Image (spheres, grey):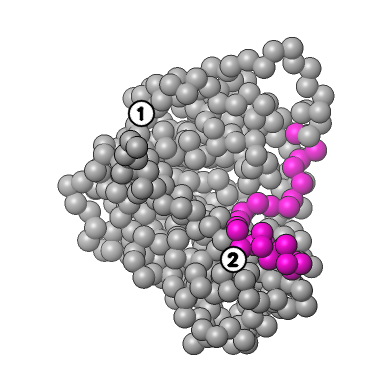
Amino acid sequence: MPKIASKAHSMPASPIRKLVPYAEQAKKDGKKVHHLNIGQPDIETPQVVLDKMKNLDLKVVEYSHSAGFQSYREGLSDYYKNFGINLNPNNEIMITTGGSEALIFAFQTCLEPGDELIVPEPFYANYNGFGVTAGVNVVPVTAKIEDGFALPPISEFEKLITPKTKGILICNPGNPTGYLYSKKELETLRDIVKKHDLFLFADEVYREFCYDGAEHYSCLQLQGIENNVVLVDSVSKRYSMCGARVGALISKNAELMAMALKFGQARLSPPTFGQIAGEAALDTPQSYFDDVIEEYVERRDIVIDGLNKIEGVTCPKPKGAFYAIAKLPIDNADKFCQWLLEDFDYNGQTVMLAPATGFYATPGAGTQEVRIAYVLNKEALENAVICLEEALKVYPGKV
């Protein structure tokens, strides 16, 4: 039998999805499982998108330009103008198959195999997989729950920079923490990037979701590093249309975008139906976002306030996205999350969480932490918090 590539063996399994078999069995056993493990919102996709897709009158489902439909890129250019960001739709925006492909293209374009990429942890688990795909070494700099997952001090970044360091990657607002970087924190990053001439990869897919009067500041607005910034965007969470699989790679760096387009040409084009949906979504009224943000704030408060009332639980209140990391009085998050599905229920209900260990690159980090996605309706979240409180009373590995 031919030998499988070492890269395949190095590809990490998803910490978000690895407990799925246990959840499926729990359901077969008659339990109601509250899924707080994955960022799949139950918010309805904007009606303007659904109407567009229902009324399509296509005779041929064609390839698009490898950079995406011109009309969609022009629409995205107008969208960014609302944030004071001017982009040329012809050569500074490239439509991709989800934000995932945008980040993979960015790594393949900007980084050599063996290069190092500094990422504040905990971070979106698939960054590890994207790093393996591109042969890039992810180097973590740890953000602490005691600090609410604020950006680590500049001195911590400086300690990690070597001749192989070629970039820094952030997610803002953050998955899995929900932390929103301030303008001052981003300017600190700018100074590091400028000093060492690094790429700054910015995953800003949760831009629209900022709470308590906080405002999002884009890395594209940072002065003096225009050619260093590589932005990743997506329609998945903004419009609650994860299955559309449409994102964007954006940069002011002309050479970078020209080289990235060659990777786009190799996969021919991004999905036609997804682009049609994405372009239609640009006409989503502001009232949609106002309602969604209000809903997420209410959901967040149910979960975070409820968790912090439980003895021994620590959970910083996020200012963005719809995730939170909670520290629990348990021996091992992976064991606890599996135990919830295999051995526990409260009134026929249990909870599926994502162990936070999969969101860290540092061995042993996050062993008492879980990621929670507050993407369910308020009643379900209230029941989930009750389940967790009752579970912690009887979990055999409580500390």
- Residue positioned 60% across, 58% down in the render: 21
**Camera-nearest residue between 7 and 390:** 7
Q: Earlier in the sequence, mark 2 or mark 1?
A: 1
Q: Amino acid at mark 1?
A: Leu
The residue under label 1 is 256
- Residue positioned 43% across, 70% down in the render: 366
Q: From what the image shows, is residue 245 above or below residue 23?
A: above
Does residue 374 appear anywhere in the picture? Answer: no
Q: Amino acid at mark 2?
A: Leu
Q: From what the image shows, is residue 47 above or below residue 61?
A: below
Query: How many numbered discs?
Result: 2
**Camera-nearest residue between 114 and 255:** 114
Specify whether residue 107 is painted magenta. Answer: no
| Drawn side of residue 15 relative to residue 5, left or right | right
| Drawn side of residue 28 relative to residue 311, left or right | right
Q: Secondary structure at mark 1?
A: helix
Q: Quadrant of the N terminus?
A: top left
**Camera-nearest residue between 146 and 392:** 392
For the magenta stretch, what is the residue range? 20-49
Q: From what the image shows, is residue 350 above or below residue 331?
A: above
Q: Which mark is residue 82?
A: none
Q: Secondary structure at mark 2?
A: loop
Q: Position of residue 14 (x, y in %)?
A: 49, 53
Q: Position of residue 394 (x, y in %)?
A: 62, 86
| Residue furthest left in the image | 163
Neighbour tally class for label 2: few under 14, some 14-19, many 20 plus, Cα within 10 Å: many
| Drawn side of residue 161 relative to residue 69, left or right | left
Q: Which mark is residue 353?
A: 2
